[in-house]
Image: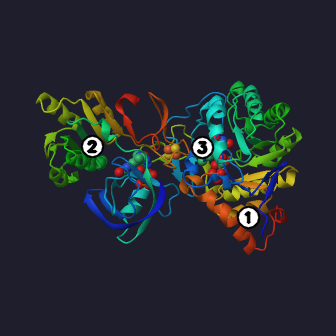
Amino acid sequence: MKDELFTIEKNDLLCKGTYLMRLKGDTSRISGPGQFVNIKIEGLYLRRPMSIACYDFEGIDIIYKIVGKGTAEMAAMEPGDTLSCLCPLGNGFDLSQIPKHAILTGGGAGAMPIYQLAKILTDAGMAPHVVIGFNNEEEMFFAEEFKAVGCDLTIATMDGSVGVKGTVVDAMKKLKEEGKNDLAYACVCGPDPMMKAVSEITASGQYDLGGRMACGFGACMGCTIETAKGPARVCKEGPIFRQEDIIW
Amino acid sequence: MVDTRVSLAGVVLDNPIIPASGTFGFGREFSELYDISKLGSISFKGTTKDPRLGNEQPRIADCQAGMLNAVGLQNPGIGAVLMEEIPRLEKVFPKPLIANISGFSEDEFVALAEAMDKVQAVGIIEVNVSCPNVHAGGVNFASDRKETEKITRAVKAVTHKPVFVKLSPNVTDIADMAKGCEAAGADGISLINTLLGMRIDIKRRKPVLANRYGGYSGPGIFPVALRMVDQVRHAVDIPIIGMGGIATVDDVIEMIMAGASAVQIGAANLVDPWTCSRLVDELPERMEELGIESLDEIRGIA
Ligand SMILES: Cc1cc2nc3c(=O)[nH]c(=O)nc-3n(C[C@H](O)[C@H](O)[C@H](O)COP(=O)(O)OP(=O)(O)OC[C@H]3O[C@@H](n4cnc5c(N)ncnc54)[C@H](O)[C@@H]3O)c2cc1C
Ligand SMILES: Cc1cc2nc3c(=O)[nH]c(=O)nc-3n(C[C@H](O)[C@H](O)[C@H](O)COP(=O)(O)O)c2cc1C
Ligand code: FES
């Protein structure tokens, strides 16, 4: 972990209330999808944790939803502005555990770490099935980018405006009924109720947990949860946890 | 060359910069970031007799100029602290440590102090009385002068190491509490712990913290902490470790001018993990700029 100064390259509205911020800076320490950064925002005391949606040699993408002061402040920033980020934090997905036909699923802004995971796995010759969920067509984003990855893709919208009507769980059940995937393994990012629902229909998998954090690097015990292996700091032992270790 | 050394009841530190309990764990995360042996000392995570998982989530809330925490003394318990944490910390920090202990009864405080007394790496025992007394309907030890005195006396009876009692600001008369500790034999006073606070999530219409209330710390409490250190300095003759909202080298100097012998830095470590390292580097430079040759010269001068 370092305190990296990133420069905003772009900060665009993706869809209602959701932005994509491209940050240029040193990414050499990032080890894989699922890690996150903790961002210092002028005028706020605690940093704000955000998943690294995507990274390459030159920078990272962050996809965020405006929910309060900090995220509103981020949305008002301009290209050229800089942000101090503790980077990288946490452990990403354990790629060695992911079988060939895994489900990669995410809801809303939480879907983003799934995007890079899908790319990496597909490039490595695996055949994941991506299931992404949104409220409606208006709030949908990145569908084209996901399509471009070239893996199987199912989109679910609550109002049925695109793809399967319902949640990602409904879409996954349908895949099973149609014999397209046995739901043996899933990598999951999204809101807690969605992740819990997914865990109830999959045999095994990895989950990107969140919650409120202070430090983000294991010092304060602010984020600790109880797991099957004992207490675990989401920021340090996680944020990716194995299904069998999570106590919902 | 300026002299940054300070003495805490006979324990001499190279400099007065000490990370505060609960914001530095047992140093492990920070030792990966910088050479922590440059610090004056380290007050490690509040240790209890049994392992504690702490409070329900969420435990953290952001505030104006600071944060609330309701971690609830999560720690692996005295057994693991003695067997694993201190041996590991000793290797990267070969100086006297400050053992921060918390009990839920007098017996627990005594057992913890007895155990810490035997640990060579421990230079000072810091007694955190800001916890509920399970034998008195959960009333906080820290809010009752008699209880605080009782704990102080009991701990003093079982250890030869200097005992610093860590006071809560959530009392009517902090000077009176400090006098009680001095009368009961305390070798020093640490202050302040966090101020009890609350935040409400207006969309959920519920408190942000599962515990409802949490401890407020960070730059917002600095003036309160400074005032309390000043009051305690005028009330007792034992050394003071001052803390509460310190983030810059000028805050350190102000705290010493208010009467502190050394200082602790808490929340600032969480926002900028290099804070303490930087303060150690900046202190001699700033002393030189201000024409201060030794910290003894400015202690309580204001
Ligand atoms: C490891 C991790 C990765 C994350 N990745 C992303 C991401 O990629 N994209 C994204 O949009 N968000 C992400 N979040 C959530 C994000 O950190 C919060 O939305 C953000 O901190 C809110 O800041 P704020 O100042 O806008 O809100 P505040 O003003 O602090 O709070 C406003 C509202 O947001 C809610 N809130 C505050 N903090 C959190 C939190 N940590 N988690 C959930 N809800 C919160 C509160 O309940 C409140 O209703 C992540 C969180 C974690 C822990
Ligand atoms: C996350 C967190 C955990 C803390 N845990 C402890 C603890 O275990 N024991 C203790 O005596 N004080 C604890 N404190 C209080 C600090 O040591 C310090 O007294 C207080 O935060 C004021 O200093 P600050 O404003 O620099 O943070 C904790 C503070 C924070 C922010
Ligand atoms: S947020 Fe501080 S330990 Fe996880």
Question: What residue is rendered at 31% in x and 42% in y?
Answer: A189
| x and y percentages locating residue B121 in the rendered image | 73, 41
Mark 2 secondary-structure assignment: strand
A218 is higher (above) or lower (below) than A69 = above
Tell me how far mark 3 sits from mark 1, CA to CA.
25 Å
Q: Residue furthest front?
A: B91
Between the residue at mark 2 and the residue at mark 1, the CA separation in whole angstroms equals: 51 Å
Q: Which residue is mark 3?
A: B25
Relative to B30, is B137 on the left or the right? right
Is any part of residue B194 visible from this angle?
no
Q: Residue B166 in the image: state x and y as whole percent.
A: 74, 43
Chain of the residue on which disc 1 is drawn: B
Q: How is the image coloured?
A: rainbow
In front: label 2 or label 3: 3
Which of B207/B228 is in front?
A: B228
Mark 2 and mark 3, same subunit? Answer: no
Q: Residues within 10 Å of mark 1 (few under 14, many from 20)?
A: many
Query: Of tags 3 and 1, which is closer to the observer?
Result: 3
Which amino acid type corresponds to the residue marked 3 in the rendered image?
Answer: Gly
Residue at x 65% of width, y 38% of height: B87
- The span from disc 2 to disc 3 (Cα, nearest Å) is 33 Å
Read off the residue under disc 1: B253
Q: Which residue is mark 2?
A: A106
Q: Quadrant of residue B277?
A: bottom right
Mark 3 sits near ligand 3, with its Cβ under 8 Å away: no
Tell me whether circle 2 and circle 3 mark residues in contact (CB < 8 Å).
no
Secondary structure of residue under mark 1: helix
Residue B235 locus on image (x, y percent): 86, 51
- Image height check: is A98 above or below B294? above
Callout 2 amino acid? Gly
